[in-house]
């Protein structure tokens, strides 16, 4: 992967970015995503935020090499602290991290007023999608688009959220994704079949324990029944 050829995962994240967006890519690593989008004239301005020095330096080099330093601001910052008022950011991408970390970044940004709550959020958690969807609902965001894809035997979900009044999702929608549930693609089925296998293994281990944890067993059995119901 480089700024010319993105991974399928990042390419799909990029496809969700609105034309001419003013983008903040948080946890940008090499700044491949904003650089690619700028080279392809998809965005008009970007901030690439990185909290770790090494990736920050790589991002700076990447942007300079492509003569984009005037249009992509690379900043060493924790989460949404990379965004400044005058950037007039309207779209935020956070990709390639766990859902819990993305939630923490958004929550901290909300507390500190760095999140204006007018931005489109394009999120790609590697795991922990449920907790992220829960944060979105609790904070007045509705999920307008979702995608599930497989790359190198890993399955990824992308969630696009926009500010919305009175959103409610059921427990099932939070777990499986309100949009993904409406169209159970092959990849969606594969993800949850894998999940069934993993949970059955956990169940087997729990049943072999010296002191059998009945409560935990009940919880896993319930989750399994639920997933099997959605797959049926
Ligand atoms: N977004 C890129 C992608 O999807 O390919 C890079 C993903 S990389 C696995 C995650 C990056 O997020 C790392 O470079 C890490 O240093 C950065 N990161 C983690 N926590 C962060 C935070 N709180 N603020 C900014 N960057 C963060």
Image (spheres, rainbow, N blue to C red):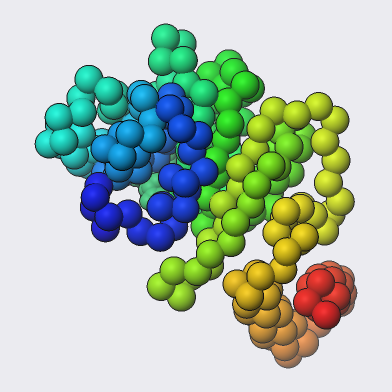
Residue at image location 65% in from the left, 47% down from the top: 145
Coordinates of residue 60 in the picture (x, y in percent) = 20, 33
Relative placement, left or right, of 172 versus 36 is: right
Residue 193 left/right relative to 16: right
- How many marks the image carries: the answer is 0
Q: Position of residue 156 (x, y in %)?
A: 53, 61
Q: Is residue 142 visible?
A: yes
On-image quarter of the C terminus: bottom right
Seen in the picture, residue 224 relative to 85 is either above or below; the reply is below
Placement of 10 over or under 191, stated as above or below: above
Where does the N terminus fall, quadrant-wise?
bottom left
Image position of 109 (left or right of 22): right
**Residue 96: x, y in percent?**
45, 52
Q: Compared with residue 96, is residue 54 higher up or lower down, i.e. above or below? A: above
Q: Nearer the viewer, residue 218 or 226?
A: 226
Residue drawn at x 58%, y 61% is 148
Residue at image position (63%, 75%) is: 186
Give the x, y percent position of residue 160.
61, 42
Q: Residue furthest left?
A: 65
Residue placed most toward the observer, 217 or 110: 110
Quarter assignment of residue 87? top left
Name which quarter of the figure residue 62 lies in.
top left
Residue farthest along the top direction in this orientation? 86
Image side of residue 96 versus residue 65, left or right? right
Residue 217: in sight, yes or no? no
Identify the image quadrant of residue 177: bottom right
Q: Is residue 131 above or below residue 172?
A: above
Quadrant of the picture in which ligand 1 is shown: top left
Q: Residue at x 35, y 43 (%)?
A: 33
């Amino acid at each position: 992967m480089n700024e010319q050829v993105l991974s399928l995962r990042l390419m799909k994240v990029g496809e969700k970015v609105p034309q001419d967006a003013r983008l903040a890519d948080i946890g940008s690593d090499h700044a491949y995503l904003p650089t690619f989008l700028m080279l392809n004239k998809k965005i008009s301005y970007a901030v690439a935020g990185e909290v770790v020095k090494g990736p920050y330096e790589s991002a700076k080099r990447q942007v300079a090499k492509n003569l984009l330093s005037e249009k992509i601001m690379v900043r060493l910052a924790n989460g949404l602290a990379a965004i400044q008022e005058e950037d007039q950011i309207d779209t935020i991408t956070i990709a390639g991290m766990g859902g819990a970390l993305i939630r923490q970044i958004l929550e901290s940004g909300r507390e500190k007023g760095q999140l204006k709550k007018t931005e489109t959020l394009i999120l790609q958690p590697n795991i922990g999608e449920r907790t992220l969807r829960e944060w979105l609902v609790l904070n007045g965001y509705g999920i307008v688009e979702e995608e599930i894809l497989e790359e190198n035997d890993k399955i990824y979900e992308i969630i696009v959220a926009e500010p919305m009044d009175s959103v409610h999702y059921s427990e099932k929608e939070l777990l499986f994704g309100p949009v993904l549930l409406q169209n159970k693609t092959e990849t969606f089925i594969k993800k949850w079949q894998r999940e069934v296998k993993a949970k059955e293994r956990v169940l087997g281990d729990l049943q072999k324990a010296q002191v059998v944890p009945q409560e935990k067993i009940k919880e896993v059995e319930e989750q399994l029944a639920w997933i099997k119901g959605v797959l049926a």
